[in-house]
Image: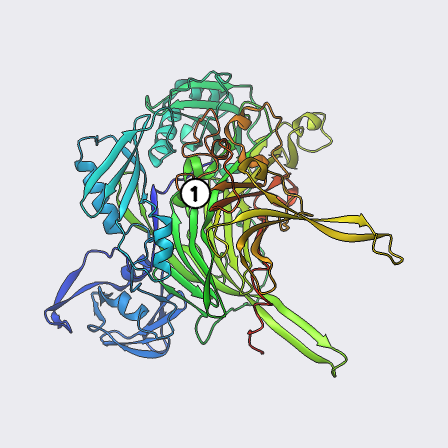
Amino acid sequence: MKKRKLASTIALVTMFSLVMPSIAPFSNTANAHGGEAEYVPLRTAVENVGGTLEWDQTTNTILVKKGGTTVRITPNSAEALVNSKTVQLEAPVVSKEGVTYVTHHFINEVFQADLNQTVSVEKADHPLNPLTADEIKTAVKVIKASEQFKENMRFTQISLKDPDKDQVWKWVYGEKSPFNRVAKFVVLDGKKVLEGEVDLATKKVTSFEEIEGVHGMVILDDFVTVQKAIEESSEFKDALKKRGIDDEKKVVATPLTVGYFNGADGLKQDLRLLKVVSYLDVGDGNYWAHPIENLVATVDLEAKKVIKVEDEGVIPVPLTPTPYDGRDKKQKREMKPLTTSEPEGQNYTISGNKIQWQNWDFHLRLDSRVGPVLSTMTINDQGKKRKVMYEGSLGGMIVPYGDPDVGWYFKAYLDSGDYGMGVLTSQLQKGTDVPNNAVLLDATITDNDGNPYTIPNAIAIFEQYAGPELKHQEMVLGNQNVSRERRELVIRWVSTVGNYDYIFDWILSPNGTIKINVGATGIEAVKAVQSSTMHDPTAKEDTKYGTLIDHHIVGTTHQHIYNFRLDLDVDGEQNTLTEVNPKVEENKAGGPRKSVMVTEQKVVKTEQEAIQNFDPSTIRLLSNTNKENKVGNPVSYQIIPYAGGTHPIAKGALFSKDEWLYNRVNFMDKQLWVTKYDPNERFPEGDYPNRNQADTGLKQYTTNNDTIENVDNVVWMTTGTTHVARAEEWPILPTEWVYTMLKPWNFFDQTPTLDLPEK
């Protein structure tokens, strides 16, 4: 299932703070500030920030496009048109031997020049800003110079250590006290996992220690090791030959975590292992359609060799070419252009990592494990900046399969915890992944050696029309009509985890609603079977754990379960989980009615009492009982783990209670958890879930059963789908969605969008 691993650590940066290519001066060109201007190739400079180049033959000019900005430049000119505004450049654009060059300040000059430009260099640091490329380099240099570091160590994480929450909120509200920047890191020494910290001010390692009894994340080196190991294994080659495969170079290995079965799988717990399920590359661009079934290799990553081959019998590899990109469709549909444009500029501003849109202000960064993190979210309520959420992000996710066969029983992927979904970030494309009006933000990544580099277009931000915000036509008053447009701000990120691509949308509305939508697309993990159609005698047995979606191909039933860590601070940190239950009672007030509708309210007092499945008829609120709206109701936000979707809802985990997976991962079976805030409790599956024997996440966090009444709480919201395959999802899955929502509940005094303009 897992195909690629980009790197270890991601930090969101603006498109202006990038590592540029090597630069060289042209001695015949004066620098506006004296000396010689330093030049770089235009194409390299632009492509490094995810921009595009076009040559306009009519005007003999070059068009540079990035985000919402279009720059028109003329060779040998020191002027540029930025969104039709003239900007003076540091030095002229020059051409030499067919290559166009600009100064190394060109990117900053043109993308900061437009007064209406959305993105700008941040004028003041934010305490939650991720590590910069220079800070990462500093941290790595200090770590490698320490006595504890060994040359064979590999980095799996380098990120900012979270500063004190209370101090951050004070900073947001104007108390600009200094922050000590600390880098935390995780390294692998063979099968050992070590954690540490680096004080970036003093440039000293302040901690560096081994974490006993855990297995580290899967890294890029492991993919290479696994592929080489199966190609060198004579036992694996013999198994391939039994299936008519003589060229092991055409076999694509997918390194998979092995899970935990208390030794029932015959594997030693102290070894660093991956299992390998393989596919055959037949040249159609879709090796996923050609599984080598009933054959599994186990690779010892330290010994770098196959230690076990499980062969449960030959099932022919499906060989029919099955491209998923439409290359076999000669006739393509005709589509007229659909254009989304903002001719007067965007309605939001991005200042470094800080984003302001309508009445929302928040900080955005990208985490190497969980992807986008939205922090210090406030909403402007008639001039007052009110707290909504300190930090919201994906907490973790799991994709468990239900087939007990040799190549499937261990498949329960903890995508973010085992592999790091942030490092598997996909580059976004305008017009397909996101609309043309999107602004694309880049990400700085480090590899397992700690070397930073840039992923262009890692996160998209765009505004979209979302229907009427409100409408009423008053017949009594002469058909007076009131209607207002609803706009939404979307923060989109995509992570590709092997065969699946996951789309995460954080969607803000001016009325205070926050939606978190997850879309699954990509390619299903399929199983090779004997059956060609459902009329074959083998079909009943072949489809016991899935659906026959093509000749000799079964899509195996599985689940996609997501948990979101939501550190809500509803108008302040002191919050309480409350429930409102609508119910029917006998009418005792008189009149002809036999029954009445009432609501019953309840305060949830402890962590374990809060653990529950989602009942859509119950209104669950995180309330600030210390604050009231104008009529005296406590201000609250409603928590809705399932607000609709296009795939069947996962009401819980489809496993028996004695399943080994239950010992390791509890978050998947309940839709709501609330814990007392602890900065060290970050992930619902625990810090190191790879091969873990027990749940070190939410089950452990709630063992002490802390009170959650009128304290600083974290909401853990689980949602997901049960994926029963169908033919329309093969060979590629049209995006299927699951929706969640956080909604203000008596948070405001009235409809918060009465100030929207008329059209």
Is residue 742 at least partly visible in the picture?
A: no
The answer to whether 256 appears left or right of 732 in the picture is left
Query: On the rendered image, what quadrant is the C terminus found in?
Result: bottom right
- Please give left or right for residue 53 compared with residue 524 in the image: left
Examine the rendered structure and indicate whether residue 634 appears above or below residue 226.
Answer: below
Note whether residue 170 is visible. Answer: yes
16 sits left or right of 231 in the view: left
- Residue 665 at x, y percent in the picture: 52, 31
Q: Residue at x 45, y 60 (%)?
A: 378
* Residue reaching furthest to the bottom: 478
Which quadrant of the structure image shows residue 686? top left
The residue depicted at 66 percent of the width and 35 percent of the height is: 547
Question: Residue 724: percent from the left, percent from the top?
Answer: 64, 38
When the figure is inspected, residue 227 is found, relative to residue 709, above or below; the finding is above
Residue 276 position, x and y percent, is 45, 27
Q: Nearer the viewer, residue 292 or 651?
A: 651
> Of 361 and 25, which appears nearest the observer?
361
At numbered mark 1, what does the secondary structure look like: helix, strand or loop?
A: loop
Residue neighbourhood size for the residue with mark 1, other residues' Cα within 10 Å, grouped as few (<14), some (14–19), many (≥20) = many
Residue 209 in percent (x, y) is at 27, 30
What colour scheme has been applied to the protein in the rendered image?
A: rainbow
Q: Residue at x 77, y 53 (%)?
A: 597
**Residue topped by disc 1:** 421
Total marks placed: 1
Against 414, is 634 above or below? below
> Label 1 is placed on what type of residue?
Met
